[in-house]
Image (cartoon, grey):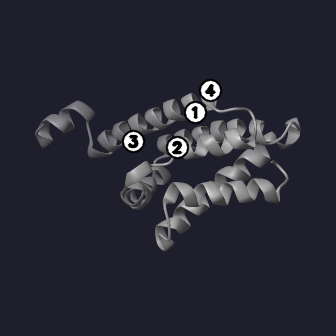
């Protein structure tokens, strides 16, 4: 499509970027919901969910370029709200698998999601082994440390 056609369809460059990134959030939400529906309701199921959300063989490319795209999500209020909503869903889905204490579900889920994201970022720097194996080890160790096994 020509640049003029894209502008006519979306109105502005920013609207086009927002539409593309909202579509990506839709895809991630669908993948997350499917992982939530399939994973057992125990800590191993929480780990399984996170591994299903991993970028696979293209981890290096997806993670480094994904961080650049994330900047757009942080700047745009609509995209920022979409990311926050996905994070809240993920935290609750993980937390339900980590604890039976209702008051701790969301907190535990956010902690696990934070460990997962931190492990992904540090893997990009270290690249010392397979990303899936590395992340699995990190989140499983965290589960053992907080007594969620």
Which of pointers 3 and 2 indicates the residue nearer the eye? 2
Q: Residue at x 14, y 34 (%)?
A: 5
> Which mark identifies residue 37?
4
Density class for disc 3 (Cα within 10 Å; few <14, some 14-19, many ≥20) is some
Between marks 3 and 2, how big is the CA–CA gap? 17 Å
Q: Residue at x 48, y 37 (%)?
A: 28
Q: Is residue 10 left or right of residue 81?
A: left
Q: Is residue 49 above or below residue 59?
A: above
Dot 3 or dot 4, earlier in sequence: 3
Label 4's element? helix
Label 3's element? helix
Front residue of 17/144: it is 144
Q: Is residue 118 above or below residue 23?
A: below
Q: Residue at x 73, y 45 (%)?
A: 109
Residue highlighted by disc 1: 35
Which of pointers 3 and 1 indicates the residue nearer the eye? 1
Contact? badges 1 and 2 (CB < 8 Å): yes
Residue highlighted by disc 3: 21
Contact? badges 1 and 4 (CB < 8 Å): yes
Dot 1 or dot 2, earlier in sequence: 1
Q: Classify the position of the N terminus by image quarter.
A: top left
Dot 3 or dot 2, earlier in sequence: 3
Front residue of 110/120: it is 120
Dot 3 or dot 1, earlier in sequence: 3
Residue highlighted by disc 2: 53
Q: Residue at x 68, y 38 (%)?
A: 45
Between marks 1 and 2, how big is the CA–CA gap? 8 Å
């Amino acid at each position: 499509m020509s640049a003029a056609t894209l502008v006519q369809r979306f109105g502005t460059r920013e609207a086009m970027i927002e539409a593309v990134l909202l579509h990506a959030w839709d895809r991630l939400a669908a993948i997350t919901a499917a992982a939530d529906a399939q994973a057992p309701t125990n800590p191993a199921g929480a780990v399984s969910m996170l591994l299903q959300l991993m970028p696979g063989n293209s981890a290096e490319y997806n993670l480094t370029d994904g961080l650049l795209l994330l900047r757009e999500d942080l700047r745009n209020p609509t995209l920022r709200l979409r990311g926050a909503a996905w994070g809240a869903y993920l935290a609750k889905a993980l937390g339900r698998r980590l604890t039976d204490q209702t008051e701790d579900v969301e907190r535990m889920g956010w902690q696990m999601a934070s460990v997962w994201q931190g492990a992904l970022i540090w893997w990009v720097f270290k690249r010392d082994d397979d990303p899936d194996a590395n992340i699995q080890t990190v989140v499983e160790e965290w589960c053992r440390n907080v007594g969620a096994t």
